Amino acid sequence: MSQATVRSAQLSVGTATPALVAWGNSGGSRVYVHQDGNSNHAIYFGGSAVTAATGFLIHKGEHIDIYLPEGAGLYAIASTTGTIYVMQTGGI
């Protein structure tokens, strides 16, 4: 049986350079991301070159649940600098 891990963090996401949110662990990972309901910024998710024009948008108070294959990265960029809450499970 493989050992599962759980990681949680509060990450600052800026407007210029995409921030690494999570990396798929061995065997893949499930990533849960929540944006604070009190924030006034949009967050865009995608690969390492994500932009506001190409990313998957979540608004304040929303959350997403993503499966990341082993070795895949999830990145984010924001309309204005803000905080997201991340929990990642799976892998070793």
Image (tube, grey):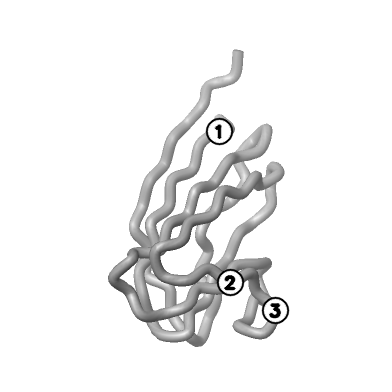
Marks 2 and 3: which is nearer the front? Answer: 2
Residue type (three-letter) at the residue carrying disc 2? Leu
User: In the picture, residue 73 is in which quadrant?
Assistant: bottom right
Q: CA distance from mark 1 to mark 3?
A: 27 Å
Q: Which residue corresponds to mark 1? A: 90
83 w.r.t. 41: above or below: above
| Quadrant in which the C terminus appears | top right
39 w.r.t. 73: above or below: below
Q: CA distance from mark 2 to mark 1?
A: 24 Å
Residue type (three-letter) at the residue carrying disc 1? Gly
Most extreme residue toward the left is: 38
Query: Which comes before the other along the chain, label 2 or label 1?
Result: 2
Marks 1 and 3: which is nearer the front? Answer: 3
SS under mark 1: loop
Marks 2 and 1: which is nearer the front? Answer: 2
Q: Which residue corresponds to mark 3? A: 54
On the image, the x and y values in percent for residue 12 come to 37, 70
Q: Which residue corresponds to mark 2? A: 57
Pointers 1 and 3 in contact (CB under 8 A)? no
SS under mark 2: strand
